[in-house]
Amino acid sequence: MEKKSLFDKIWDAHVIQSIPSGPDVFFIDKHFIHEVTSPVAFLNLEKRGNKVMFPERTIATPDHNVPTVDQDKTIKDQLSRMQVEKLRENCKKHGIDLHDLGTDHHGIVHVIGPELGITQPGMTIVCGDSHTSTHGAFGTIAFGIGTSEVEMVFATQCIMQAKPKKMRITIDGELGKGVTSKDIILYIIAQISASGGTGYFIEYAGSAIRSLSMEARMTICNMSIEMGARGGLIAPDETTFEYLKGKQYSPKGEEWDKAVAHWKTLQTDEGATFDVEYQYDAADIEPMITYGTNPGMGVKVRGNIPTTDGMNESENKSYIKSLDYMGFQPGEAMEGKKIDYVFVGSCTNGRIEDLRSVAQFVKGKKKADNITAWIVPGSREVEKKAIEEGIVQTLEEAGFKLRQPGCSACLAMNDDKIPSGKYAVSTSNRNFEGRQGPGSRTLLASPLTVAAVAITGVITDPRDIIEELVQEK
């Protein structure tokens, strides 16, 4: 009997037709849409005289360029307002479930899907957004698609895809204090580069991965795309089932028992083969931070920026260009560098667990005077919990500014922009030139590292603060 990986099991179960020497016609269980990539797809769909085939399989929310202040008022930016209004109009016309601004479950599309229990093991999920890979944390095949493919899914609930190659990354052992899932994924990308996963779908495995919460697993799968991978996934287990139990869209009663019985079969078979495998020891992973202009340019917070030794002329030129943009020099230490902004949010780290960890760190402290600190919850549900648990009060007393749900400064499509030349330590997923605003300089890190930076005003290893907290007790 053929030994199959988890990826193979899900993929093969969704292939409707295989085209010889071509792609597979592949069925999609859930289609998430937002205001940026859907308008043109809807327009082209209607030009062809088509309708959305399965509107009940499509879920919508505005998130990318919505304002994060005064969401109860008319959106000032004309393009943003038009896109949100078009989303509302199209959802109403086609009978699509819309979690709009001001509703109880509005938020970033990759945050509300899991919160509502829409994302479930064994599914195929797509969205016109590269970080759809987030949903792979539940044992799904989830990936981003382009506008023409959004239209294809609207019309047929299928997509044409060549089957990617398979990679497994195994991390065993126990994580040290102050080390989070964000550090794990930044460590992996630094090891294999921002293109090391190109052409692959990645399964994350090992005891360190199994020890993580669902929210932490989502962070890892979210950033699979940042090493060029098509997506990432983690096998479902009791942690997954416990997270999903009782959620709005989760199965109930006997259907729940049947679902769990099936979900338990979604494991990679012993002896299944992968095209590439990597193994890492959790003990080698420390708090990480990026220093350059792609997510693979990362080092330990207590480390130094790599030198140009061993680089060829082309690599050297590109590397120096990146450091020049950042205002850094080869060989410099990261610790102690002055920072201007910190940002906690995005589909990578805008969940309640992230806000809790930051609040625990800064409780009873004040942010540094040179720091502007933005906290943006990933959804209304996260915002509600943060208020109920006193997190908002703690953060505001520490000098943080809490905004309303949305993608915010992750990609600066609204007013939440880092000014040109300023440094931001961010929990988001990309540090490209101008990603958080024209001329902005982004350093990616975990919520704990962001909290440490907010308190000290400079790049600081969160373990230093942890040691202080222990001594205080």
Image (cartoon, rainbow, N blue to C red):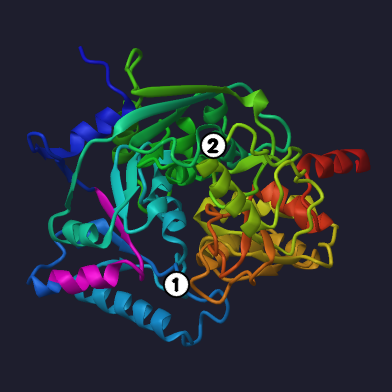
Looking at the image, residue 214 sits to the left or right of residue 168; the answer is: right
Q: Looking at the image, which is closer to me, 388 or 446?
A: 446
Give the number of the mark in front: 2 or 1: 2
Magenta stretch bounds: 29-45
Q: Looking at the image, which is closer to me, 315 or 211?
A: 315
| Residue occupying the point 28% across, 35% down | 164
Q: Label 1: few (<14), some or many (≥20) within 10 Å?
A: few
Residue 25 in the image: state x and y as whole percent: 13, 43
Q: Is residue 174 magenta?
A: no
Classify the position of the C terminus by image quarter: top right
- The answer to whether any part of residue 436 appears in the image is yes
Residue 139 in the image: state x and y as whole percent: 37, 36
Quarter where residue 228 is shown? top left
Real-space CA distance between mark 2 and mark 1, rounded to the nearest whole angstrom: 54 Å
| Residue occupying the point 79% across, 39% down | 463
Residue 51 in the image: state x and y as whole percent: 12, 67
Classify the position of the N terminus by image quarter: top left
Q: Is residue 119 above or below residue 77?
A: above
Residue that badge 2 annotates: 312
Q: Is residue 40 magenta?
A: yes
Which dot marks residue 103?
1
Number of labels in the image equals 2
